[in-house]
Image: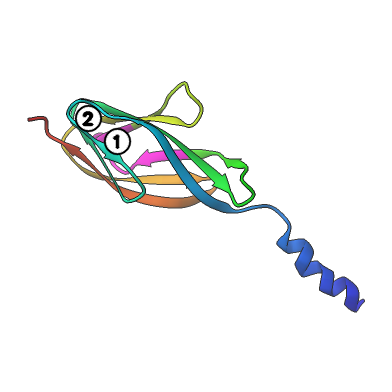
Amino acid sequence: MKRLLLLVPILLAGCGSSFDRLEMSAIVTSDLGGHINDTSMSVPEGLALKATILAFKDDNDRLGLTIRATDPTILDVEPVVTSGAFAFIGRKAGHTDLTFTAGDDVVLIVGADVTAQP
């Protein structure tokens, strides 16, 4: 019986994988600028920024990822045709937050600014 009890924590530790990281690549901005990283995001009003953002488990398998803006009237987020790609569309100047959810867990919240065009 002791041997079985010692194996249970080892078996439980091996069950499933948890979120490990986000990878951002293929970032396409406009001539008026914009950026996205794991601490902030900006996009000019009326324009879009595109990025491929993938979530990975600690075993390197991909997790499903959703990204939502707290205020979609300021910044709209839409998945695009390419797997893992998102378009961030500046609707009106202002500030909102982006919530990144991988699997069922919120893994990142980033401040996002839509800047007025010059």
Residue occupying the point 22% across, 30% down: 91
Residue occupying the point 48% across, 23% down: 82
Q: Are marks 2 and 1 in contact (CB under 8 Å)?
A: yes
Q: How is the image coloured?
A: rainbow
Q: Secondary structure at mark 1?
A: loop
Q: Position of residue 42 (x, y in %)?
A: 24, 39
Q: Position of residue 88 (x, y in %)?
A: 32, 32
Q: Nearer the viewer, residue 29 or 19?
A: 29
In the picture, the quarter occupied by the N terminus is: bottom right
In the picture, measured across the screen, residue 104 lies left or right of residue 13, that is left
Q: Position of residue 109 (x, y in %)?
A: 37, 51
Inspect the image, locate mark 2, and give the three-letter code of the amino acid beneath it.
Answer: Arg
* Badge 2 or badge 1: first in the primary sequence: 1
The reply to whether the magenta stretch includes residue 6 is no
In the picture, measured across the screen, residue 5 lies left or right of residue 31, that is right
Q: State the residue lying farthest toward the top.
A: 81
Magenta span of residues? 66-76
The reply to whether the magenta stretch includes residue 68 is yes
Pointer 1 residue: 72
Pointer 2 residue: 91
Cα separation, mark 2 vs mark 1, equals 8 Å
Inspect the image, locate mark 1, and give the three-letter code of the amino acid beneath it.
Answer: Pro
Residue 103's disc number = none
Q: Nearer the viewer, residue 53 or 1?
A: 53
Residue occupying the point 69% across, 52% down: 16
Q: Position of residue 95 (x, y in %)?
A: 21, 44
Residue occupying the point 61% across, 45% down: 60
Residue 103 seen in render:
no
In the picture, the quarter occupied by the C terminus is: top left
Q: State the residue lying farthest toward the bottom.
A: 2
